[in-house]
């Protein structure tokens, strides 16, 4: 199965992190928050995408936060992610703007994802690091006309699920750059390849 390498790596890193979680030299001296923003290219199950009349790949942008425990490798976090689907079933509707002008507007398909996760953040030499997390997400998606309160709207059934995430990056004095790979273990999303930037407060 294609998620085995990611799940195996994540499990190995989590096991190593838990084993050394008590080592004060491995984690930050003081607990604190890290805020992050990221771009991710998400792959969607082909059957679910076909039923919803969207493409099997979608870009997404998200924001989140993570809490680092003092003298520990353990981290917990969560956030919000917006998905921009490529819509294969657009519709048009006559709308009126605030100035009374009427025109035809086309729909778009999008989704919002809420996620929580937990894992370990393992520092390496030369300011490098690796992270491994497991988490879960819920997704709400629809096809609608933007900025229109009374227009037609329909639900898109793309389900969230559990995932394993492996991440690597480089840490600077006040921020980090990272590359991540997320493998979904359930639901209609399959994987995500992401780039992130974060800043910490500890």
Image (cartoon, rainbow, N blue to C red):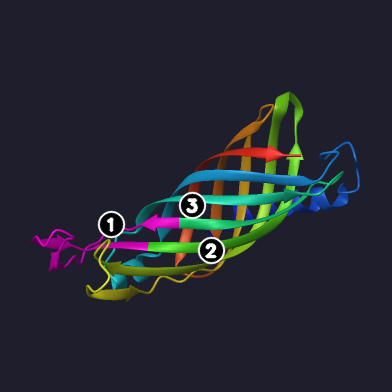
Determine crowd level at label 2: few under 14, some 14-19, many 20+ residues with C-alpha closer than 10 A. some
- Which residue is pictured at 53% across the width and 44% down the height? 37
User: Is residue 78 on the magenta stretch?
Assistant: no
Considering the image in quadrants, where does the C terminus appear? Answer: top right
- Relative placement, left or right, of 21 versus 193 is right
- Relative placement, left or right, of 86 versus 8 is left
Q: Is residue 12 visible?
A: no
Q: Is residue 152 visible?
A: yes
Q: Which residue is mark 2?
A: 114
Please give the label number shown on residue 86. Answer: 1
Q: Quadrant of residue 107?
A: bottom left
- Which residue is pictured at 60% across the width and 39% down the height? 198
Q: What element does badge 1 sit on?
A: loop
- Which residue is pictured at 81% across the width and 46% down the height? 31
- Judged by depth in the image, the label closer to the viewer, 2 or 1, is 2
The image position of residue 79, as x and y in percent, is: 57, 56
Give how far apart the Cα atoms at labels 3 and 1 are: 16 Å
- Which residue is pictured at 29% across the width and 75% down the height? 154
Q: Which residue is mark 3?
A: 192
The image position of residue 131, as x and y in percent, is: 68, 45
- Relative placement, left or right, of 82 versus 178 is left
- Position of residue 197 relative to residue 62, above or below, is above
Give how far apart the Cα atoms at labels 3 and 2 are: 15 Å
Judge by depth and name the residue closer to the eye, 64 or 21. 64
- Judged by depth in the image, the label closer to the viewer, 3 or 1, is 1
User: What is the span of residues highlighted in magenta in the rendered image?
Assistant: 82-110
């Amino acid at each position: 199965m294609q998620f085995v390498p990611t799940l195996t790596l994540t499990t190995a890193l989590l096991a190593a992190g838990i084993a050394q979680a008590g080592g004060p030299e491995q984690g930050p001296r003081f607990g604190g928050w890290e805020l992050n923003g990221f771009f991710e290219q998400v792959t969607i199950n082909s059957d679910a995408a076909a039923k919803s009349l969207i493409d099997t790949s979608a870009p997404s942008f998200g924001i989140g936060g993570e809490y680092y425990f003092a003298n520990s490798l353990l981290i917990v976090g969560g956030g919000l992610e917006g998905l921009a689907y490529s819509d294969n079933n657009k519709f048009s509707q006559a709308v009126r703007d605030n100035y009374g002008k009427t025109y035809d507007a086309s729909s778009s398909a999008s989704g919002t994802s809420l996620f929580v996760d937990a894992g370990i953040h393992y520092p390496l030499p030369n300011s490098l690091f690796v992270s491994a997390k497991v988490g879960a997400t819920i997704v709400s998606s629809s096809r609608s006309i933007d900025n229109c309160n009374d227009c037609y709207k329909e639900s898109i059934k793309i389900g969230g699920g559990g995932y394993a995430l492996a991440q690597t990056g480089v840490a600077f004095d006040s921020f980090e750059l990272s590359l991540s790979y997320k493998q979904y273990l359930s639901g209609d999303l399959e994987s995500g390849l992401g780039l992130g930037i974060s800043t910490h407060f500890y």
